[in-house]
Amino acid sequence: MDRRDFSKCGLMLGAGVLSGSQKGAAAAGGRSGRTGNYYEEPPKKLPVRQFDVVVAGAGTGGVVAALAAARQGAKTILIERKGYPGGTVTEGGTALHSFYNLWKAFPGVKKRQVVRGIPQQIIDRLLKVGACSGHAEMSKGYDYDSVCTAIDTEMYKLVTFEMLHEAGVYVCVNTLLAGAIVDGTRIKGVITESRSGREAIYAKSFVDCTAYGDLAAFAGASYNEPNDYSVCNSIGVGNVDLEKLHEFLESHDAVSQYCEGIRSGEEGKIVRIQGRSSRLPDGFRQGMSDIGMSMVTTTVHDNYMMFVKLNLKLLVSPTSRDEVARGELELRRRQAKAIGLFREYVPGCEKAFIARTSPMLNIRRGRQIICDYDISHEDVIEGRHFDDDVFAYGFHDSAPKLQVKGGGTYGIPYRALLPAGVENLFVAGMMITSDRRAHMSTRNTVSCMGQGQATGTAAALCSRKKCGSRDLKYADLRRTLKKDDVYFEG
């Protein structure tokens, strides 16, 4: 299905032209039938709910977007296909990158926390329940990131769920976004599917945090599908010894990253470690290469590696159901092989086992949505700021090869979060930026969180002021973001 067909399908879904089930068809008194290779579903009346703001996707950016919108007084609904919030933070990463500028790599540069606001409030809540390492300073590998902020994946789900509940967000988990109701250049509503049935959700403002760009595509926004990253399925590994893992890597002079923080309630313990695979035993190194395993992990618990990442390059975009099905099987085979490697080669891991897997593979990019502004590689590494910045960010996942100039930051402009041709839609997360080098920064977790606060706030303001996304006065948005502890350079 190409972009036009996908958008047309979303429009038809929203208009109620397509239906859900035979039972629903009979109740509606419509006709159905098969013509060649197609089955035509009859019309069906859907129950309607009314909100101010719809946030699609309760992942890294979506949680923060929904919290931001609700705290501005907007009646907010959050739609998530899984049974919990969290997304890549809980399933696909290694730590949260990065709340700070890269000061440690540039002697004399001032240390400053550049992402604050709601993202920091989440960290504060996690620290209270012993589910975070804190912003622990890296002692080796700090030219990559100055800090490691590791989290307990399961407690993150609970803490953010509770925060959403407290903010009054109407949370619809186990609910699929199935289409959009579009009138010209505006979205009027979305279609959802759940075991409670099929519903139409009307609102004034919409935020796409699906990672795949599903809502933007349903709404007719233009996009590309670069397929320029591997997908992964990260596992949690139990019954391991972090100190012995460190000794193993040290014995091969292979430690490239090292950080101590809070682990199992005690400070000064290993919370992040990475090894150079080129210096490890031949069998282990080759085995890692064969399964796309990265020798980096974080943890906040003794005897547990929170993330061990297995990567796989798909032949086509991860929006392909059949290619993803092949990938899901292959990644789970790789997970089993990873455990075998740890048991065979790494002291203290002889009885290691898989303690956690992600429910589905994780992506680094699905659809790249065409927005009013396309952040460039030069914008990022030159540390450029804009007259419509919505927050500052300073991490680059290609460091130390690529870093933001002088340990500084760059700005995410408001324009970069507005899908071209749609008047009341925002996107947040890994969907922005066509330049892969720039995307190696903008797609990272804490950047997505910052984008979430900006878009959720803007969506609520647009709803309140009854204006489109491009009619919102930037001064009003910036004033509100600053009030809510968003950091701006200068």
Image (cartoon, rainbow, N blue to C red):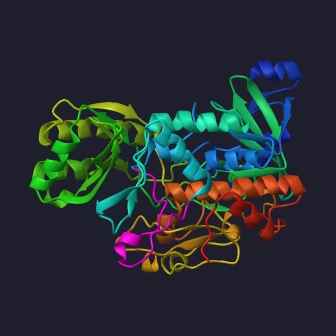
Q: Position of residue 359 (x, y in %)?
A: 47, 34
Q: Does the magenta stretch include residue 133?
A: no
Residue 29 x %, y %: 89, 22
User: Looking at the picture, how far across and down is residue 100, in whole percent?
Assistant: 47, 64
Residue 106 belongs to magenta span:
yes
Q: Taking the image as drawn, is residue 22 in sight?
A: yes
In terms of depth relative to the viewer, which is nearer, 182 or 138? 138
- Left or right, 479 with reference to 211: right
Quadrant location of the C terminus?
A: bottom right
Q: Is the magenta stretch mostly helix, strand or loop?
A: loop
Q: Is any atom of residue 5 visible in this view?
A: no
- Image point 51% across, 53% down: which residue? 317
Residue shown at 18%/49% (left/top)? 246
Residue 338 falls in image quadrant: top left
Left or right for 180, reference 208? right
Which residue is nearer to you in this view: 319 or 417? 417
Q: In the rendered image of this protein, does residue 401 appear above or below residue 27?
A: below
Q: Is residue 459 left or right of residue 90?
A: right
Q: What stretch is highlighted in magenta?
A: 95-115
Q: Residue at x 85, y 26 (%)?
A: 31
Locate residue 115 relative to residue 35 in the image: left or right.
left
